Image (cartoon, rainbow, N blue to C red):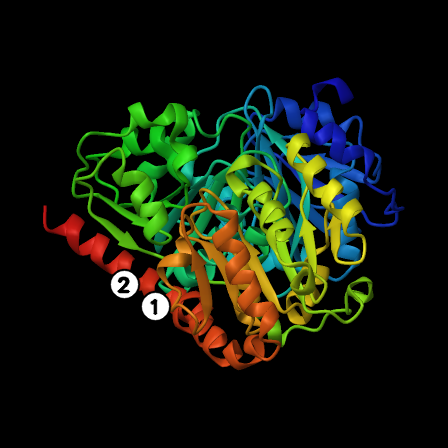
Amino acid sequence: MYSTYSQFQQFQLSTQPYRDTQLTWLAVYAPGRCVHLAASLEYQLHRKFHLTAALEPLPAGVEGVVLAAEDAECLSTTLSYFAGALQDGADFAFCDAVFGFEGDTVLYRAAHRPEGCGCAVLSRGLLDRCRAAAADPDDPAALLAQAVRLAERPAHIPQALLRYRRELCAADLFSQHGKRALLLSHVLDMTGAPIVLVSAVPVLRQLGYEVAVLGPGDGGSLPLFVEAGATAVTHPDCVSASGLWGLAAAADLVVANTIVEVKAIRALNGGPVPVLWWLHDAFVGYGYLSHLIPRTLERNVRVCAVGSHATAAMHAHRPDFEIGQLIYGLPDYAQDTFAPYDTGYAGGLPLFVSVGAFEMRKGQDILVEAIRLLPEELRAKAAFLFVGKGADKRLLTQVQQLCADYPRNVFYAKRLSRDEIKSLMQQCACTVCSSRDDPMPTFVTEGLIFGKPGIVSEHTGTAGLITEGVDGFVYHGDSPAALAEALGKMIANPGLAARMAPACRALYERYYSKQAFADTLRAEVRALLEQNAAE
């Protein structure tokens, strides 16, 4: 049976601990054609169960009933988890699932969203209440619907314990009532675009939407979406899986994240569903995708971007597009509790910080040269930290050589944890973004949360929001000399960063706070719906 599991389920099974649940007797009610379910029950680790095609009479010792509204293949641990949930006090327990003949579509249910599940376990007491309330007391689908309504202690099991040999449909994601929002993201990792997309989930839920997100396999941010209240669907080819875009036809709102979703935009352009296309992309991000951008966008599509730089990147290809501004929001990390990151290596000198993967677009070589151009007496009065994975070995070599040349003043860290980054931003004097092409660098915004000014290239989205000398500095022409001049101003005036702190914090609250983002997103959604209704 193990060979029939999806690759995801095989990986998941290897991490599941065994729990002895044999004292709990379950009935499995499968009155329909449930060939795969019946076959998979032969391999259950939990052996104390009774497969039945009728709910009357049930043996007196049965403590819970697994209801199957359709044929579903169970993992060998499914009944163990269901019985364990009852033992832990749940009266209704539902789980994640995989779909498709290859099992490559995974559904991660939000903990508060049991609607649409085709198989779940009910306590004996809840089953009796559901049968009394249901129009058809023998219909498992009707009983599951009643269980969602009547359960007092529901539990979500965050494991894909079921496999459906069919494609995912909208009924698996959404309830039959209420508004539906579908988010499309080409990655679900810990990079900027998916991280800030998470912040849209609570705002959309406040607007009354049930929220689902479609992306590839989990790269780190998927749990954040689920914790925020979204149901998540993953498919390795989500950007080109037109069958999954069909879910959009059942939604009331679609949010497509970044230029990479351009194929979905082409498919949805001119359709009945309102689409908010949120651009976070640098100029380089358009690469091989620019020819796919529609020449015109119909009323159902509205474009937004995270600032002037991302706007200019799209306008380089479609100058006639009307593009609204939707700058991401970040939580107020200054209110968080986190362990201090040891910056003792800086020897008490003001610390200038650059964070980002090493690539030419990020311009670490410009900052390296700028540090070398500083007068010796100024360079000796400051410390510099580069943080980022050395994807570009040439850039990494330059930074490492700089560290070797100035070991008391220049340092490198491959990666820091989220809490270490927060603590670093709390302690540093200034952030430095030397990018050649960067829509809205997140670490500069994180510095603003703690009142730290940023020195940024004109080729960043942040540059369009900074007031020169008040809450940051902007240098031009990708010039190391110009960057060195800005660094020199900060170093030569030790109290300048502290004096700028209130204005930096105000810049965060005005543009990047969760409230500012929520207000702007609500306004953009409202404008999109009015635009779509005007057709």
Quadrant of image for the C terminus: top left
Question: Would you name the residue on which mark 1 appears?
Answer: 519
Rendered location of residue 150, percent (x, y): 54, 62
Dots 2, 1 in contact, CB < 8 A: yes
Relative side of 202 to 290, left or right: right
Callout 1, which amino acid?
Asp
Rendered location of residue 41, percent (x, y): 74, 29
Q: Nearer the viewer, residue 217 or 395?
A: 395
Question: Under tag 2, what secondary structure?
Answer: helix
The circle on residue 208 is: none
Q: Residue at x 20, y 47 (%)?
A: 322
- Residue 498's place in the image compared with 471, above or below, is below
Rendered location of residue 292, percent (x, y): 30, 25
- Residue 408's place in the image compared with 219, above or below, is below
Callout 2, which amino acid?
Ala
**Which residue is farthest left?**
535
Q: Would residue 133 be seen by someone viewing this image from the given angle? A: no
Relative side of 474 to 16, left or right: left
Rendered location of residue 254, percent (x, y): 34, 45
- Residue 193's place in the image compared with 241, above or below, is below
Corner quadrant of residue 96: top right
The residues tagged by marks 2 and 1 sit, at their Cα atoms, a distance apart of 6 Å
Q: Would residue 101 be seen by someone viewing this image from the given angle? A: yes
Question: Would you name the residue on which mark 2 appears?
Answer: 523
